[in-house]
């Protein structure tokens, strides 16, 4: 079965750029999306179809996908961006999630 | 407002059954794929099942095949998950989510999520 791999944790200073990666075999041939989940809350879609932002998601969230890796980039990271982030792709009629990355803003 | 509200969770013994419901409002329910996604305590997200707009296609994660059944009633704007032969490892918060999918394209993303309902399987 298809697998997506994320780093367990990423740290960033306020105002700096955070990059969270998601690796999978030929992931660039598929579309990736990203969800943000804060403690005790439901996931929120922040990027879909590699690089599109849903309405209401700040412009500081962006995405890319090429080769075997998708990347979620948060520019000018704010304290409110501290959360778990999950990548997701579609393969063989199945939804596949990455294991999640805890973003710490310190 | 677009909204999904799950219900039906609770405490059940191993081997027991439970039926989850998800009530949709604020959008044309019959136009969307729908999904169930779960999250075990302290763990990541795990996709459980998808169902096509008219219910003609259903897909499941291997660990629940033969035990769980996803269904929908478009007249009632409702999604369901019948869970049988429950195991301790099924303990999780179960989320209902609206899916976006187009045949022939390699994407499926979920843009609306409910708050979840908690299922605990324990004796």
Image (tube, coloured by chain):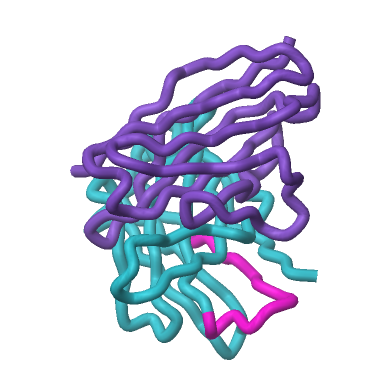
Q: Residue at x 61, y 12 (%)?
A: A11
**Residue B36 seen:** yes
Query: In the displayed structure, does residue B88 sit left or right of residue B38?
Result: left
Percent x, y of residue B8: 59, 57
Percent x, y of residue B21: 57, 65
Q: Residue at x 75, y 27 (%)?
A: A76
Q: Colour of chain A?
A: purple
Q: Residue at x 47, y 77 (%)?
A: B72
* Magenta extent: B19-31
How many numbered callouts?
0
Percent x, y of residue A56: 77, 54
Position of residue B104 relative to residue B59, above or below, is below
Q: Which chain is cyan?
A: B
Q: Quadrant of the C terminus of chain B?
A: top left
Return the residue nearer the eye: B27 or A74.
A74
Position of residue A48 relative to residue A17, above or below, is below
Return the residue nearer the eye: B63 or B82.
B63
Q: Quadrant of the N terminus of chain B?
A: bottom right
């Amino acid at each position: 079965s298809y697998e997506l791999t994320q780093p367990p944790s990423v740290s960033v200073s306020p105002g700096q750029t955070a990059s969270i990666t998601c690796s999978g075999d030929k992931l660039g041939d598929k579309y990736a999306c990203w969800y943000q989940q804060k403690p005790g809350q439901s996931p929120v879609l922040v990027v879909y179809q590699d690089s599109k932002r849903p309405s209401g998601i700040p412009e500081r969230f962006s995405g890319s996908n090429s080769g075997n890796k998708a990347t979620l980039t948060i520019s000018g990271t704010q304290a409110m961006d501290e959360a778990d982030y999950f990548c997701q792709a579609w393969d063989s009629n199945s939804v596949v999630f990455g294991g999640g990355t805890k973003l710490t803003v310190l | 407002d677009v909204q999904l509200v799950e219900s039906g969770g609770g405490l059940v013994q191993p081997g027991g059954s439970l039926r989850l419901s998800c009530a949709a409002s604020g959008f044309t329910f019959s136009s969307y794929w729908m999904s169930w996604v779960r999250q075990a305590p302290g763990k990541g997200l795990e996709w459980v099942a998808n169902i096509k707009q008219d219910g003609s296609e259903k897909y499941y994660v291997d660990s629940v095949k033969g035990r769980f059944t996803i269904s929908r009633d478009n007249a009632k704007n409702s999604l369901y998950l019948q869970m049988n032969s429950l195991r301790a490892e099924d303990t999780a918060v179960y989320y209902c989510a609206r899916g976006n999918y187009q045949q022939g394209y390699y994407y499926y993303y979920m843009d609306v999520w409910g708050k979840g309902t908690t299922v605990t399987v324990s004796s």
